[in-house]
Image (tube, helix red, strand yellow):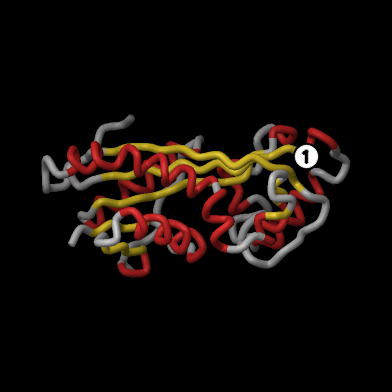
Amino acid sequence: MPEIVLATRNKGKIRELKSVLKKVQPDIQILGLEDFPEMGGIPETGSTFAENALQKARAVCAHTKRISLADDSGLVVPALDGEPGIFSARYSGRNASDQENNRKLLKEMEQMDGDMRRAHFACVLAACAPNGETTLAEGKWEGRITTAPAGDNGFGYDPLFWDTELGCTAAEMSTQEKIERSHRSRALHRLLDLWPEFWQRADQGRGYTEPTSP
């Protein structure tokens, strides 16, 4: 049975990724970093979502000797010069909670209205195979930032992210609605389009080789 390691301990991300992967390829065994407790921290020193996703996928693949799938994602607010961006999870500090990050974002935007409150979630998924083959897929979810949190069915910035088409925040959606619309789901569906070719290239060599830079 083929195995894929999801390079995250975030239960919300794992739940979203598993729900889509299992529908497309039900025979895949999906593992998470909780299945490899001996693995230490994963570096995230890139300056873009793509660089960080590749860095994580390669590190996990090297450790587990299995195909790995990593994402780097975050909230982008053009009026804040792209912040929080790649620092979304630690916007208000390295060990910041979701609530602390949300409070900081609301504070930074309290004088903004209209189009200045436009934002989007961005996600880049990177897959890495033991023979060094890699592939990338991107997804984007457009919306706006509210002036106060609403909803409790989500994580991160979901309570502040307003989907203008559905007329609610991401945290007010059902799990299925969010899966269908999220940046991560869109990136994953794009990845699945690329998957057959990637899988073929990944199967051309079994041993791990140090990959070259993109």
Spot the residue most to the right: 111
Residue drawn at (25%, 41%) of the image: 196
Please report the residue visible at 44 percent of the width from the left and 61 percent of the height from the top.
Answer: 14
Quadrant placement of the C terminus: top left
Q: Position of residue 208 (x, y in %)?
A: 16, 47
Where is 49 relative to 100, above or below? Answer: above
Left or right of residue 98, residue 198 in this image:
left
Q: Element type at marker 1? A: helix
Q: Which percent across, then down, holds residue 38?
A: 31, 68
Q: Residue at x 29, y 38 (%)?
A: 134
Q: Is residue 101 above or below residue 190?
A: below
Q: Is residue 130 left or right of residue 73?
A: left
Count the marks: 1
Residue 172 shown left or right of residue 200 in the figure: right
Instruction: Please name whichever residue, 11 or 151, is drawn nearer the observer in this view of the structure.
Output: 151
Q: Position of residue 52 (x, y in %)?
A: 44, 42
Residue type, label 1:
Arg
Query: Which residue does the numbered mark 1 point to in the structure image?
Result: 117
Residue 149: x and y, percent?
77, 59
> Furthest-top residue in view?
214
Residue positioned 59% across, 53% down in the render: 89
Q: Against 88, is 99 above or below?
A: below
- Which of the pair 136/210 is nearer the observer? 136
